[in-house]
Amino acid sequence: MKQDGRAFDVIGQLANLRRYARSLVRNAVDAEDLVHDALVRAYERRSTYKSGMGLRRWLLAIVHNTHIDRVRSAMARGRRDETIALEVDEAYPAQQELNVRLAQVRRAFLTLPEEQREALHLVAVEDLSYQEAADILGIPVGTLMSRVSRARAALREYENGAAKPSHLRLIEGGGND
């Protein structure tokens, strides 16, 4: 592609972009994703590039801005998750034992991978059909069913293993007779 008679040589800048992305995210796989997203943005906005500004600088700025957008998005997602967790506590007041149990289940649910958590939430909490949930997530129904199945299996494993609160066992067997 030519821009004002000069080569718009994005390929020649890949090493620089990857190196900068790795310094930002400290992970080679995430760095590749960041470079990919930045190059998509650069391609979409190629008409804004002016040959006098320097292609390398323009592309590095796009990588930087893409990274900042990702960080902000992750922070916002974290705040939303925290808010939801607090609302769940306030929405369902229960007796002390049930409150502890609810907190344990919530923690187990929140440790599920995001794709499993969102699938299980839509099906089990929002009571959507598999087809409706798959449409919302933009995935095939079979993929959704697999994610829900893996999420349920992980929660069952938690229930059968680590779900027993050790601090309550100490109270039960700790008396001197």
Image (cartoon, rainbow, N blue to C red):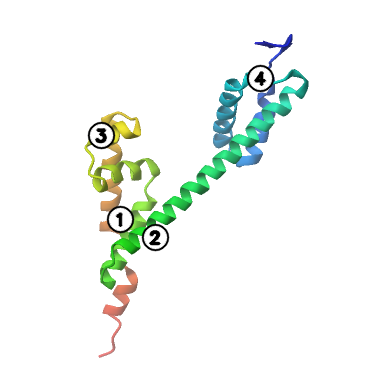
Give SS at disc 4: loop
Location of the N terminus (image quadrant): top right
Compute the Cα span from label 3 to label 4.
Answer: 41 Å
Q: Which label sits on residue 132?
A: 3
Observer-side mark, 4 or 1, equals 4
Compute the Cα span from label 1 to label 3.
Answer: 28 Å
Q: Residue at x 71, y 12 (%)?
A: 7
Q: Residues within 10 Å of mark 4 (few under 14, many from 20)?
A: some
Q: Quadrant of residue 143?
A: top left
In this view, the residue in front, 69 or 34, is 69
Q: Residue at x 70, y 28 (%)?
A: 16
User: How far across and how far down the image is residue 111, in percent?
Assistant: 39, 52
Residue that numbered label 2 is attached to: 86
Tell me which numbered mark, 1 or 2, is placed earlier along the sequence: 2
Residue that numbered label 4 is attached to: 10
Q: Residue furthest right?
A: 52
Observer-side mark, 1 or 2, equals 2
User: How far across and how far down the image is residue 57, in percent?
Assistant: 73, 28
How many numbered badges does the structure rendering display? 4
Residue that numbered label 1 is attached to: 158
Tell me which numbered mark, 1 or 3, is placed earlier along the sequence: 3
Q: Which label sits on residue 17?
A: none
